[in-house]
Amino acid sequence: MRSLRYIAAVLREFWAHWISYLVLSGVVGILISLLIIPALRWVTRAVLVAGGVPYLTLTNAPSVIVNHPFTSIALLAIGILLLALVYLQFAVLLTGVNNIHHHENYGWRQIARAVWSDLRTCAGPPSSSLPPTASSSSHSPVWSLVRACWQRCACRSSSPRGCSNAHHWPSRLPASTWS
């Protein structure tokens, strides 16, 4: 019964601010589809043309790596840039959802500043197998959510999948997860 009440509360929260969530996801989606993807396609095409590679597939990738090392390095850099942009998209969405949840009327500039400061202070996941502490230098909503989920997990198995039993997860995350 608690989970049904939690789902009802989450749905009430969503429907109270559905326009804000729609605008947030719509603006991020439009930005990615109209600006980021064409720019990355253009840069990738320019790298392939400059390297003299007519096309790139899985079958000719080994020959491109062997015969065109600078093109391969440039394509690897584009791949790393793509991973960073995916992280930024996720961070912007989580920061925006966090702001909507806390009824903070931040504009896009404040969200961008918060994401940039989170990116600068966040060194990534902890290097040890221990969960990060509250005194960690990273206070981003992304890492606070990861930290809360990690701390909620009752089984600290050494398997790469982590907690595999669904009953070890709580029925709901407390409101402090979002702070």
Image (cartoon, rainbow, N blue to C red):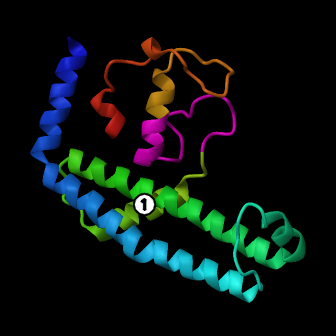
- Residue 93 picture location, percent across and down: 35, 54
10, 141: nearer the viewer = 10
- Residue 174 picture location, percent across and down: 30, 27
Say above or below: 115 vs 152.
Answer: below
82, 137: nearer the viewer = 82
- Residue position for label 1: 115
Say above or below: 6 vs 137.
Answer: above
Residue at figure coordinates x 69%, y 82% from the top left: 47
Q: Which quadrant: the C terminus? A: top left
State whether residue 110 appears in this view: no
Question: Residues in magenta?
Answer: 125-146
Residue at figure coordinates x 38%, y 75% from the top left: 34
Residue at figure coordinates x 34%, y 64% from the top left: 28
In which image quadrant can residue 19 be found? bottom left
Q: Is residue 10 left or right of residue 37?
A: left
Residue at figure coordinates x 81%, y 78% from the top left: 70
Magenta: main secondary structure equals loop
75, 174: nearer the viewer = 75
In which image quadrant can residue 173 be found? top left
Residue 134 magenta-drawn? yes
Residue type (three-letter) at the residue carrying disc 1: Val
In which image quadrant can residue 80 be found? bottom right
